[in-house]
Amino acid sequence: MTVLDHRNDPVAAVPGWRPGATAPRTDPAPLLPDPAPHRALGTAAADAADPELLRELYRRLVAGRRYNQQATTLTKQGRLAVYPASTGQEACQVAAALALRPTDWLFPSYRDTLAVVARGVDPLQALTLLRGDAHTGYDPRATRTAPLCTPLATQVPHAVGLAHAARLAGDDTVALALLGDGGTSEGDFHEGLNFAAVLHAPVVFLVQNNGYAISVPLTRQSAAPTLAHKAVGYGVPGRLVDGNDALAVHQVLTEAVERARTGGGPTLVEALTYRIEAHTNADDATRYRQAEEVDAWRAHDPVRLLEDALRGRGLLDEQLVADAAERAEQLAARMRAEFHTDPELDPMSLFAHVYAEPTQQLREQAEQLAAELAAEAEAGSGAGNGVHGR
């Protein structure tokens, strides 16, 4: 059968299809992102915004900046094995947490610990994976927050599956998947978007485009006009937003979440932002980007943008500044206190929560480790009684 012979083609059963038709099944125009990123601060939208929402965004951004600083310090002290800072991306992290209901689900990547903490998870629990202590430090079911995902984009299909299952169960749950620009180059991202669109799943994808996949610039990853344009190929609307404008990100995500909740299907949101710090504490960012570039983005800092907007509306006084700073310091102090002592870890927990039913190989490995631990304990006990070393 040639491409011009449609008579026996099964797609002829598609509603609205007719032999020779070349029109797309869906009008792409409504799916296309706006030519320029959506901004709210400094516009009429900011003037109409709820003052208390703006103040709460400010408090959380200040706390988020302090959180990133303290977590980075913990790596220098050896309390954390690694930390991928979200400094400069706090607006995306905070807005993501605030856009969700407690019954919704968040699917974070490894750089999204601030979003997890902003959702209410204890900082120690949120950083357990990066400390190297356990697969995750919090209960995903209780917190409605999936474990931090280190492999790129593998959380995307998980978010789609959970959202689809919730819809089948009659729940109004929405899943929000967070990923970076590098994650859009992974197959899981494309598979997830395709399934979400076909299943009309109540899920939102937030791509925090910070310009680099470690050291690889976006221009070496994609030739698309924007990453938001990728949504159109799957029949999903794409939105483009200034990722350092906390109010704008909150508006776009809130709209996308409610659209998904009310049966409108998935949305792909690209937030243009920048990571001020290196990829992780093990990275030397000066090898692949210039200081002038970093300085330019510092001038577009999310905390400063919101602070200036609040001052312009007369919503930021010294009391609010002091309260926000105190709240941030309390968070940092709690982090220092919780990370001050080393936890007592059970090596056998390595085998927990891997499979619902452990495989034969895992059972054998667990038995081997248990035997080794028992032998070490016996040897240690013998040494204490003077049996060894004579």
Image (spheres, helix red, strand yellow):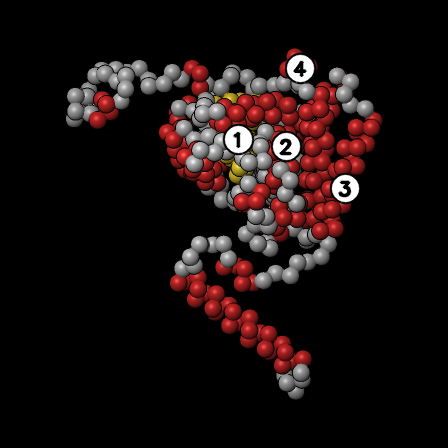
Label 1 – label 2 distance at C-alpha: 12 Å
Packing grade of label 3 (10 A; few <14, some 14-19, many >=20) is some
Give the residue number, with chain letter if any, for mark 4: 48
Question: For this rendering, which residue is in front, 225 or 123?
Answer: 123
- Position of 50 with respect to 237 (left or right) is right
Q: Quadrant of the N terminus?
A: top left
- Position of 187 with respect to 377 (left or right) is left
Question: For this rendering, which residue is in front, 243 or 315?
Answer: 315
Helix, strand or loop status at disc 4: helix
Give the residue number, with chain letter if any, for mark 1: 206
Give the residue number, with chain letter if any, for mark 3: 330
Give the residue number, with chain letter if any, for mark 2: 94
Which residue type does callout 1 highlight? Leu
Dot 3 or dot 4: first in sequence order is: 4
Q: Closer to the camera: disc 1 or disc 4?
A: 4
Label 3 – label 2 distance at C-alpha: 18 Å
- Splitting the image into 4 quarters, where does residue 4 fall? top left
Dot 3 or dot 1: first in sequence order is: 1
The residue positioned 71% from the left and 51% from the top of the image is 338
